Image (tube, rainbow, N blue to C red):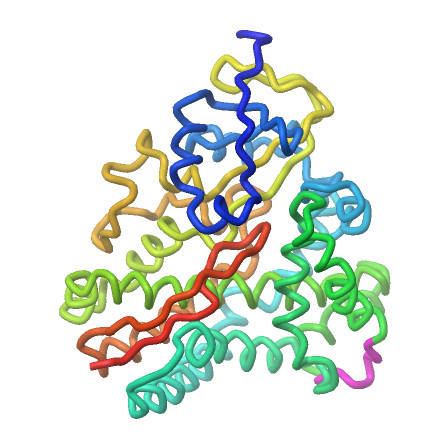
Amino acid sequence: MSSQRPLSDADLFSDAALLDPYPTYRNLRDLAGAVWMTRSEAFAVTRFDDVRGALRNWQVFSSGRGVGMNEPINERIAGNTLSSDPPRHSLLRQILARPLSPPAMRTFTEQVARQAETIVERLVAQRDFDAATDLAQFLPTSIISFLVGLPEQGRERMLEWGHAAFNTLGPLNQRCLDSMEVARGLIDYAMKIDPAELRPDGWAALAFAAAARGEITLADARLLILDYVGPSLDTTIFATSSAIWLFGLHPDQWQLLCNNPALIPGAINEVVRLESPIQIFSRYVTSDTDIDGVVVPAGSRAMIVYGSANRDERQWDNPDIFDIRRKAGEQLAFGHGIHMCVGMPLARLELRCLLEALVKRVKRFELGEVRRARNNTLRGLEKVAVKVH
């Protein structure tokens, strides 16, 4: 075990890195298991085994002091589901997960499938559309707003608020600073909601009911609304648009899927492995720990780089190749351990229903203009113009 810090002056949050982070990720993986990033003043943990190990070890890699890369936002979000440790995290997660249990999800699976068929049929009839907006945004915005049961007023800004909230989790760069005021709108919205305006059997109403029973506080119930809305939109939207983009680039893979729709669950794993919607969350290191011979001291920030772990050549053969036959079930795009994404079953359901509807109607995707979004936390595409054949 060495006290020497492998150093890098790469900026993982620059425009260039956000557009193409993978060469930098490879350099960091080759340099060491943990690398001190001089610009971010945090360690980058980039190898698959080390990222998975850190996510399992919440006692050392703590979320309780926030998962962002700046202290103002960490202070603001500390104690919510994302930024908490057991036992508080266990309590909040238990309540958050109730509407997403297998029995509960069976009640709306048919609705998701029906809406997926409707939107795909309409867009295929058009032939030309933007997969990043017309297709990818439809299910998350329509399904989530209905299931959470929020009032109409304010819902139209959910995408803007969610995107800004993820930006604020980065360092205090201009992108983060510009998003602070916008993201505050989501918090204000949740704090001002009148429970009487909620759909009685919606998820938000269930959170307020838990507060009424004394399981959580009223403030906790309002924070759970943020947990239902924020993470469930952008991540699924970006996973969907990335899927269409990848299948447009690799028509042979789309043909494989059309010939064998049973590959759809594995294809979803491969999409999010290759293009992980969440690239980085941080953790607060509570005690000195060794990562591949590098001492990461207590009090440090460790960046857990999911996007790098999912392309680690130590874990995957030819990791930069898109192959839907790959056994990618161990990918970390949905997290791992106690903070594994609560909404993963819903995200998988939405993606599966869309792909099932598409394979019945589309022989290939012809890509037009493609434009990548720039976000401190997320990776995805803001425009994917396609023509379907």
From which residue to which does the magenta span run? 193-199
Relative to the observer, which residue lies in front, 313 or 147?
313
Q: Position of residue 147 (x, y in %)?
A: 60, 78
Residue in the picture at 85% in, 60% down: 217
- x and y percent of residue 97 in the render? 61, 61
Tell me if I can see residue 150 in this picture. yes
Residue 234 place in picture, x, y as percent = 54, 65
Instruction: Give the residue at the far top of this rendering.
Output: 2
Camera-nearest residue between 55 and 87: 55
Q: Let me know if residue 57 is in the magenta part.
A: no
Residue 370: image quadrant is: bottom left
Query: Which residue is at a point 59% across and 28% down the rendered structure image?
Result: 37
In the depicted structure, whether residue 123 falls above or below residue 29: below
| Residue 59 shows in the view | no
Query: Is residue 194 part of the magenta span, yes or no?
Result: yes
Q: Is residue 161 left or right of residue 276?
A: right
Residue 252: image quadrant is bottom left
Tell which of 250 and 101 is nearer to you. Answer: 250
Q: Quadrant of residue 123?
A: bottom left
What is the tally of numbered marks visible in this picture?
0
Task: Give x and y (percent) for residue 230.
Answer: 64, 64
The reply, left or right, for residue 340 in relation to residue 187 is left
Which residue lies at the image location 64% right of the left edge and 55% below the top edge?
167
Which residue is at the front of the view, 363 or 290?
Answer: 363
282 versus 38 height, above or below: below
